[in-house]
Image (spheres, rainbow, N blue to C red):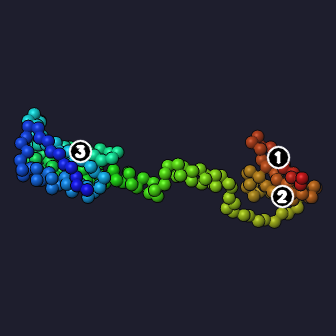
Amino acid sequence: MTLNVEIFGRNIEITDRIREHVDKKVGKLDRYLNTIEDARVDLAYVKSARNAADRQVAQITVSGKGFILRVEERADDIFSAIDIAIDKMQRRIGRYKGKRYRGRGNGKSFGEAFAEEIKSEEEKESPIIVRRKRFFLVPMDESEAIEQMNLLGHDKFFVFFNINTNSINVLYQRRDGTYGLIEPELA
């Protein structure tokens, strides 16, 4: 695909040498992004620039289906301004391609990616047992369980076999410092 390059000048004469340089450099931009359809190069001489090194201005605008990329560079020589603008345009095309083509990286639409995200969150919600612990229960009464709980340094709860009820109980310390007892029963 050939790139259509238009060159416009303001306060500057577009010589054959400038036209050849622009065609040669800008014509290579479609190697970086093959969907570029048009390129417009505006060259200008700005007499009122504060710095003499900023008087030559090269502005390059490339467009294609769904995008427009523009760069502007200033230099003391028009050829330098064109070359710097071309380099800047190549970097801008690289960033555009990175955002455009490497977005999700797998070619899936947003809807598909969103549906997979919801499925993975649902899977995460189901609890997974990551550790199992076994210990021996020594038969004891409730007062011995409180004493053992304090001796072992268990602040939250203590599981024991209640000698009085012949069942497994859970002793826990409440916020107010008192103790609670859970006595499970089979349904």
Looking at the image, is mark 2 or mark 3 nearer the viewer? 3
Q: Which residue is mark 2?
A: 160
Q: Is residue 4 left or right of residue 53?
A: right
In this view, the residue in front, 53 or 182, is: 53
Q: Is residue 87 visible?
A: no
Residue 2 image-quadrant placement: bottom left
Q: Which residue is mark 1?
A: 180
Mark 2 is on which residue type? Phe
Dot 1 or dot 2, earlier in sequence: 2
Q: Position of residue 181 (x, y in %)?
A: 84, 49
Q: Position of residue 50 (x, y in %)?
A: 12, 36
Asked if 116 appears above or below 57 in the picture, the reply is below
Q: Residues within 10 Å of mark 3 (few under 14, many from 20)?
A: some
How far apart are the two marked residues, 1 and 3, measured between alpha carbons?
76 Å
Q: Which residue reaches farthest front?
A: 1
SS category of the residue bearing label 3: strand
